[in-house]
Image (spheres, rainbow, N blue to C red):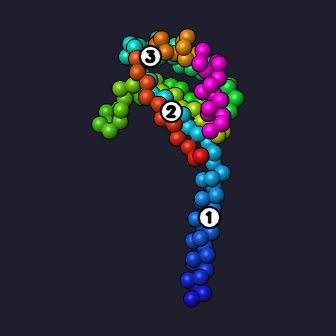
Amino acid sequence: MKKLFISLLFISSFFSANIAHAQADQRVSHVIVVWLKEPGNLQMREQFIKASRALEALPGVLSRHVSAVIPSNRPKVDDTFDVAVTVTFENTKAFKNYMKSKKHKQMLKDQLKPLVNRVVVYNFGNQ
């Protein structure tokens, strides 16, 4: 009986620690997958990547990565896009501020959207 009680206590503390960690992790991930107007155009890819990197220093951004697709022969891997961007924010508030940022909006309008044919966006995190 004592071993059962200790085991249950251990299991309960393990799950409590994991729940507390998930609640403490307020990060938000913003993933953008981009198909350019001229698929495979290396110059357009570099232009998109260079312009996009100018947004790395905006407040609330923990990390930001932008680069070209890695071609794959695996059938489950979608390599039809040209460029992808992953941005990690401190929390939901930082994410929302970034999306409303004048610099972000201006960069999208003037430099990024003119290059883009299609975009798919994924946002996820603990709230």
The CA span between labels 3 and 2 is 15 Å
SS for dot 1? helix
Disc nearer the start of the sequence (3/2): 2
From the viewer's perspective, is 118 left or right of 100?
left
Name, please, the residue furthest toward the bottom: 1
Disc nearer the start of the sequence (2/1): 1
15 within the magenta span: no
Range of residues picked out in magenta: 92-106
Disc nearer the start of the sequence (3/1): 1
The CA span between labels 2 and 1 is 30 Å
SS for dot 3? strand
Mark 1: give few (<14), some (14-19) or many (20+) Cα within 10 Å.
few
Mark 3: give few (<14), some (14-19) or many (20+) Cα within 10 Å.
some
- Nearer-the-camera pick, 54 or 59: 59
What residue does disc 3 label? Answer: 116
| Mark 2: amino acid | Val
Q: Position of residue 60 (x, y in %)?
A: 68, 33
Position of the N terminus, as image quadrant, is bottom right
What residue does disc 1 label? Answer: 16
Name, please, the residue furthest toward the left: 75
- Principal SS element in the magenta part? helix
- Nearer-the-camera pick, 46 or 96: 96
Name, please, the residue furthest toward the right: 59
97 within the magenta span: yes
What residue does disc 2 label? Answer: 31
Q: Position of residue 83 (x, y in %)?
A: 46, 24
| Mark 3: amino acid | Val
For the point 63% across and 28% down, the residue is: 98
| Mark 1: amino acid | Ser
For the point 60% across and 59% down, the residue is: 19
